[in-house]
Amino acid sequence: MRQLDGLACQEFIDALRQLGDATAIPRFEEVSERLMKATGWQIVGVPGLIPEENFFALLADRKFPVTDWIRKPEEFDYVVEPDIFHDLFGHVPLLFNPVFADYMQAYGKGGLKAAALGACENLARLYWYTVEFGLIRQKDGGVRAYGAGILSSAGELKFSVTSPETKRVPFDLERIMRSQYKIDTYQATYFVIDSFDQLFQATAPDFTPIYERVRAQPEILAGDVLPHEVIVPV
């Protein structure tokens, strides 16, 4: 929490207090009560990763699954499978933001449709590069993190926002759906949105023709920057 200032988006920092006392064991029912009053969401305890369609169904119903186990000390900076710190600290605060909360519900509804169209991988990439590893340009022009995968990693938070090695490119829905990603190291590319409204509006169209266009184009390797793309400065 001490290193969030200047690296995490202000919306996240403002919502953190809603999780309760940072020195106490979090109580899901207490957080859910505050969350329900704010945006109509609640959190649901789960033992680990759940099937995709179950996950989508929960999001569509404004319920967010939070795992009930925590990483070991040697896994402090990065875990492949999400734990309670990643889920509760990384994800839940932004569910107090009305626009982001609506985006998450729209994503859940879109996921159920994607499952029927065989397009879950394309939609998973959108989730990965926004909800998990997204960056946002704040009103002061600075780039900050809003993705839970970044916010729950002390190392990647600083790397994604300040490192000169980081490739930050403007948000592009179809480009993201074509882009591979890394699950065992820091990301090679990050996508920057201008606002949560932009993110929500991107989910408004019917994705069916978008999936068709994406499938007809080659995939993009993690870390590749396309010729027309301009690296976003911090």
Image (cartoon, rainbow, N blue to C red):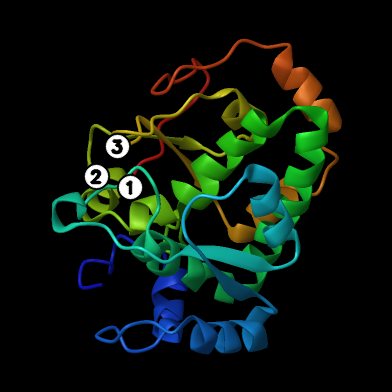
Q: CA distance from mark 2 to mark 1?
A: 11 Å
Tell me: 143 left or right of 97. Answer: left
Q: Is residue 32 above or below residue 80?
A: below
User: Residue 80, image x and y in percent?
Assistant: 35, 42
The residue tagged with tag 2: helix, strand or loop?
Answer: helix
User: Residue 209, image x and y in percent?
Assistant: 85, 27
Q: Which mark is residue 159?
A: 2
The residue tagged with tag 1: helix, strand or loop?
Answer: loop
Q: Quadrant of the N terminus?
A: bottom left
Q: Is residue 22 above or below residue 205?
A: below
The residue that label 1 is drawn on is 234
Q: Which one is nearer the viewer's eye here, 34 or 231?
A: 34
The residue tagged with tag 3: helix, strand or loop?
Answer: loop
Q: CA distance from mark 3 to mark 1?
A: 18 Å
Q: CA distance from mark 3 to mark 2?
A: 8 Å
Mark earlier in primary sequence (3, 2): 2
Residue type highlighted by circle 2: Phe
Q: Which mark is residue 57?
A: none
Tell me: 221 left or right of 69. Answer: right
User: Residue 158, image x and y in percent?
Assistant: 23, 51
Residue at horizontal 47 percent and vertical 60 percent from the top: 47
Residue type highlighted by circle 1: Val
Q: Which one is nearer the viewer's eye here, 181 or 171?
A: 181
Query: Could you tell me if residue 38 is visible in this image?
Result: yes
Residue type highlighted by circle 3: Tyr
The residue carrying pointer 3 sits among few (fewer than 14), some (14 to 19) or many (20 or more) residues within 10 Å by Cα, namely: some
Q: Is residue 38 above or below residue 97?
A: below
Mark earlier in primary sequence (2, 1): 2
Query: Could you tell me if residue 139 is visible in this image?
Result: no
The quadrant where residue 142 appears: bottom left
The quadrant where residue 173 appears: top right
Q: Which mark is residue 186?
A: 3
